[in-house]
Image (cartoon, rainbow, N blue to C red):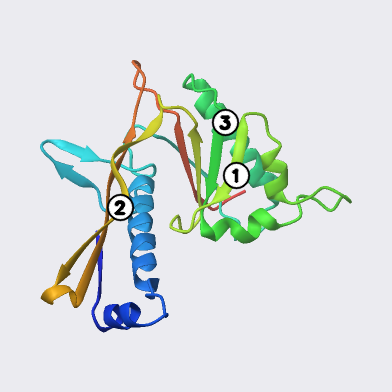
Amino acid sequence: VSQSRYDGAIASSRNGNTPLDLTNLELAAIKVAEEAEKLVLGTASTYTFGGGTVYGLINFPSRITGAFLNPTVSGWTPNMLYNSVIDMLKAASDKYHYGPFRLYYSTGLMAPMLRQFSSNYGAGSLLSNIQQLPNIAGVEMLDYLTGNQLLLVEQSAQTARIVLGMDITTTQWQENGGLLEKFRVMAMMVPQLKVDQAGNCGVVHYTGNATTV
């Protein structure tokens, strides 16, 4: 929930041709959306109520976990991270989750992802080569996923979905005889991550913890 208020600007807007500046209101909506993204990722604190806990993608206990070589380690090459993504696809397949998948990477991997995949002419970047892997529907960097992390998420409601109680909504009311206008931007949405009857999950989370080639 985020709140904004406008007082003197209301009168100026009503008495002239200058429209009301809604910058703060737009920023409030962005802040609400950012908090929702953090909740889905699991970078916000877990929320527990009534015996249940809301988990995100990187703190869901049933996710598949693993490690890849930190790109800062001497001897690292883009091909190594490429092979780690293949390992992630294999790990999901071993748990009977076959995709299609979206691969999300952290801000710390932006530079490695944009590196040339090899010295061969026309090889393209590491990112473009990963996008060509079978069952990879898309590759995207997430602003609130930091460090060296990779998330492979099966694009199925049987793996993850958003329970939407209320979309981002703006409420408005007046005080002080209409001279004070207040706005509140709010939303009600939580992630729901699932496992199958065998306890298998279609979320694979690898971190750059490995330090030896």
State the image coordinates of residue 71 (x, y, percent, origin top left).
60, 56
Sort mark 2 into few (<14), some (14-19) or many (20+) by Cα contacts within 10 Å: few
Q: Amino acid at mark 1?
A: Val
- Which circle marks residue 18 in the picture? none
The residue positioned 12% from the left and 35% from the top of the image is 51
The mark nearer the N terminus, 2 or 1, is 1
Question: Which residue, given by chain and number where applicable, does mark 3 sit on?
Answer: 89
Q: Is residue 173 left or right of residue 30?
A: left
Label 2 sits on a secondary structure element that is strand
Sort mark 3 into few (<14), some (14-19) or many (20+) by Cα contacts within 10 Å: many
In this rendering, the answer to whether 11 lies above or below 92 is below
The mark nearer the N terminus, 1 or 3, is 3
The mark nearer the N terminus, 2 or 3, is 3
Sort mark 1 into few (<14), some (14-19) or many (20+) by Cα contacts within 10 Å: some
Is any part of residue 178 visible from this angle? yes
- Which circle marks residue 169 in the picture? 2
State the image coordinates of residue 186 (x, y, percent, origin top left).
26, 55
- How far apart are labels 2 and 3 at the CA level? 38 Å
Looking at the image, which is closer to me, 208 or 145?
145
Question: Which residue, given by chain and number where applicable, does mark 1 sit on?
Answer: 139
Q: Amino acid at mark 2?
A: Thr
Q: Is residue 23 left or right of residue 109?
A: left
Q: Please identify, in this view, whether the residue under mark 1 or under mark 3 is nearer the observer.
A: 1
Looking at the image, which is closer to me, 210 or 125?
125
Q: Please identify, in this view, whether the residue under mark 2 or under mark 3 is nearer the observer.
A: 2
Quadrant (top left, top right, bottom left, bottom right) of the N terminus: bottom left
Label 3 sits on a secondary structure element that is helix
Q: Furthest-right residue in view? A: 121
